[in-house]
Every structure is written in structure tokens, then in C-alpha cells.
Amino acid sequence: MARTTETTETRETELPKGFRSAELGWPELDRIPHPPRRVPLLGDVLGVNRRTPLQDSMRLARDLGPVFRRRAFGKEFVFVWGAALAADLADENRFAKHVGLGVANLRPIAGDGLFTAYNHEPNWQLAHDVLAPGFSREAMEGYHAMMLAVAERLTGHWDRETAAGRTVDVPGDMTKLTLETIARTGFGHDFGSFERDRPHPFVTAMVGTLTYAQRLNSVPGPLVPLLLRSAARRNAADMTYLNRTVDDLVAARRRAGRGEGDLLDRMLDTAHPRTGEKLSAENVRKQVITFLVAGHETTSGALSFALYYLARHPEIAARARAEVDRVWGDTERPAYEQVAKLRYVRRVLDESLRLWPTAPAYAREAVRDTVLAGDHPMRRGAWALVLTPMLHRDPEVWGEDAERFDPDRFEAGAVRARPPHTFKPFGTGARACIGRQFALHEATLVLGLLLRRYELRADPAYRLKVIERLTVMPEGLRLGLDRRPEGARGRVEHAAAAACARSTTTTPRPNDDTSPHSPAGCPVHRPAD
């Protein structure tokens, strides 16, 4: 939020000597630990890999504790991951979303779209109120058949790869799936992703803009024109392509008159129920780009991590598959309401999002002078970045085995027993992801379809490597598939028991999220929820 010159000057005189304007808002910043061996002017740059800032911050968090700070090029950043601190930041009366770091770097392409709008910009509330009905139960039920149709294109592609004896590119194919899903359901468009040997140019341009936005965080502002000159040119070309693609999509809809009542129809035709105001043409473009990018990038990552963990934990995959077979039976195309009945499959997805939330941080700023968790004074406008993967690993909430993959952490009783605001893969408060139910329905449906159709084979030599581009994704993940024969559902208990037997002979490595989960007893035969 903007501050007056008078307020800023007053704050400077009250701060301890040596504090810069970049540190305003945290009067007792020196109480917050920071990495050792700071370099003058550059800050905490020793041992930092600019390609993995999230994972570097996670490493520092383990050493420095639930609140810490990092300095880069004269700017100080406060990171939070302790559950009590994150819960306090969730108080909507004292804190609001802060648009900073990489999110602000996306504003040249996403502008005042739902994800990147500043709190004071009126288009956020207007767009939210206009588009929220597009994620109602009635609307979601209408999207279901289109989600199924896109998923069938994925399974057709995987059937061909399996028949040819090839492994499948999980992140690449999940990206195709989720791009086509949001394009079809939201905007009546088909990118033809599964008919291409290479990623659609929209995906290439999108990845380029996300990567460039992240790189801006590791380069001092005055040096960007010098150090990122060629990257800036590529980014400008990527933004031009994204804008042109969306403009063509919107123009085609205007010529057609109307689609099937999807998100684009709402953006073009719906007036605010109270004010009668409509979204401007410029804002429609920003919202379409926001939904196409955010609506597929995060869900593709969530599915990719879930498939990674299912392949690494065959006993968990067997239990999930048994649930799909029991709940869906012989139904070829499950109905909308049958997806929510896959409670264990949903737990698998939630546990994947716990360990690797694909939007791995969110920022909160004080809307008035306050004290964070009763211990850290914050002035109005001061902000902190919640490091979600570490919040989801806080041993005080998740136990000393928090690195271990265990979907039963999301059994109903365990969820009720946990403090609130400890699981935040979609952000928090009024500015949390508007499409979270869409993403969860899509991902649960797809996991159910894939588990019913295939046995997953992990590459024993693969070790999880996470690529960062504001969002996170497993890098280089390929899986082997065995197509389940027709009638395999009648033999699922035998396969599940065999998977349990295999799992109990494996010795897990401590604190290794790639090691097999070896619970006491066979998890397939635990009582259903």
C-alpha cells in the first residue's frame, strides 16, 4: 500500500541506525535471524543457486527457524513458515495479500488480473464477483464432460506410447492435459496439444514469461538492462505471442456471438449484479491469460507430483486403485458426483500438495500497525513471504516424519485435529485461488481414470529433481505403464495384497520423501472412509 512521504520520514527517524528504506516496516528486524557470511552490497548470495531460490530458502529455513530474513542487493525479505506465524498472517482483519517478488514481475503480462491485481485495484473485486458463479457446483457439473473428453485424449496418447514400449513424459503430458482442459471448459478453444510432437507455442511462451519473472528476482534492478538484455527481448516476444493468441481467441468468440456459457462468455457479457459494470476489453485479455496460465500450470504440477509418489509407493497406488474400482465399478465414464467419492485418491492429491505445493509461497502485508504472533512488530505495509512447503513440513503440526509421504494425514479425523491455517496450497483469505475446486475436481478425476487403466512403473534410477519457474514441477519424470486388462477390477485385491507384500520388505531411508512408505500392516485392507 502507498505510504505518504511524511510517514516514511517519521519511520526512518524511529528506526535503529543503519536501517535502509527497504527495511521499513520491521522496527525490530535485527531480532530475526539471517544466513551467516553476508557479503557487503550483495547480501546473502554465498551458496545461492539462482535457478533454485525456493529450495535454497527451504534449506535455510531448516537452519534458521520459523521466521528468518535474506538480503539481496540492498533489499531485505522476511520469510515465515512456522504454523503459529502463518496462522496469524491469515487474519484478514490485520493482513491482506501482498503482490511482490515474482508475482509483481508478471504484471506486464497479467496486469490487474485476479492473481496479480493490487488490493486497491477495482478490477479485482469486479472480476471476482462476475466470475465466481463460473465455479459453482452447477457450472462445475457442466465442465465435467469436457474434462472427461480431454482425459480420454490423454489415455489414448498413453495407450499408443505403451503399445510402442515407450515410457511417458509425465510433466509434459500433464501440461497438455491441463492446458486443453482449461482452454476447452473456460474458453471453448482447442490447442491441439496431443496432436503435436512438441509443446504448443503458448506453453513455450508461458514458460518463458514465468522463468523470466523469476530471474528478475536474482538481478539488481539497475543491472537488468545489462545482464538480461537478450532474455528481455525473448520475454517481450513471448508476451506478444500470448497477447496475440488471447486476442484471437476473444475475437473469434465475439464473431460467433456466444459460446456455451463458459468463463469467456461471463467475461464478455456479464454485468456486476449490483453496479451493472462490465469488464473492459483490456481486462478481459488479462483475465484470460491469468486463467490459461494459472489454470493449467499449477494443476499439471500437482498431477505430476501425485503420479511420482504413486509410482514410488505401489502399496498406496494399490489402495487408491482399489477405491476407484469399488466406487466407480464398471462405469466407463464416471459421473460428476462419483468423483467426490474418491476420498482416498483425494488424500493422495492433498499429500502431494502438502510436500510440493505447486504455487510454493504467498505474501501477506499488514493493513495496519500490528505485532505478528505477539512477538514481531510490523508497521502498516510491511510484508512477509509464507514458505508453503516448509509450513507443510512444520514438525510441530505434521510430526517428526513430516518428510514422509502418507495420505492418511488427510483422514477426516486427522484433519479435524490439526490447527487451522496449516495446509495452504491455494493461498489464503479473500485472495485465495478462485479455481481451487475446479483444479481439485479435475485432478481427482484424472488420477482415478489413470489408476483404473494403468499400473505405474517407476524408474529405480530416478531421483526427484524439482524445477522452479515461480511454480514447481518434477523435472525429467518418466513412467512406465502396464495397461490393466479388461476385467482387472475383479483381481484388484490380489494385486493390492502383492503390492503390500512388496512394500513391507523395503527398508525406508529416514527423512527421504522418495523412500517407500511402510506402514504397519497392509494399507489396502484398512477400513473405508
Image: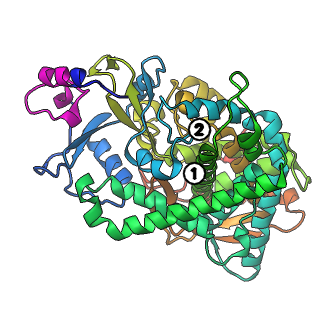
Q: Nearer the viewer, residue 373 or 449?
A: 373
- The amino acid at mark 2 is Cys
Does the rendering let one see residue 188? no
**For residue 128, side relative to residue 397 (left or right):** right
User: On the image, which quarter does residue 200 sit in?
Assistant: bottom right
Compared with 29, 266 (above or below) is below
Residue under the point 85% across and 57% down: 489
Give the secondary structure at mark 1: helix
**For residue 376, side relative to residue 279 (left or right):** left
Q: Nearer the viewer, residue 451 or 149?
A: 149
- The amino acid at mark 1 is Thr
Gap in Å between the C-alphas at discs 2 and 1? 11 Å
Q: Give the numbered dot on residue 368.
A: none
Does the rendering let one see residue 224? yes
Query: Label 2: few (<14), some or many (≥20) within 10 Å?
Result: some
Indicate the position of residue 104 as horizontal and vertical percent values: 42, 45
Residue under the point 87% across and 45% down: 335
Which residue in the protein does label 1 denote?
Answer: 298
Q: Residue furthest left?
A: 17
Give the secondary structure at mark 2: loop
Magenta region: 9-31
Tell me whether the residue at label 2 lies in contact with that at label 1, contact meaning CB atoms closer than 8 angstroms.
Answer: yes
Asked if the magenta segment contains residue 221, the reply would be: no
Residue under the point 45% across and 52% down: 470
User: On the image, which quarter does residue 178 sit in?
Assistant: bottom right
Compared with 6, 237 (above or below) is below
Indicate the position of residue 294 as horizontal and vertical percent values: 58, 49
Which residue in the protein does label 2 denote?
Answer: 433
Q: Quadrant of the C terminus?
A: top right
Indicate the position of residue 446 as horizontal and vertical percent values: 73, 54
Q: Quadrant of the N terminus?
A: top left
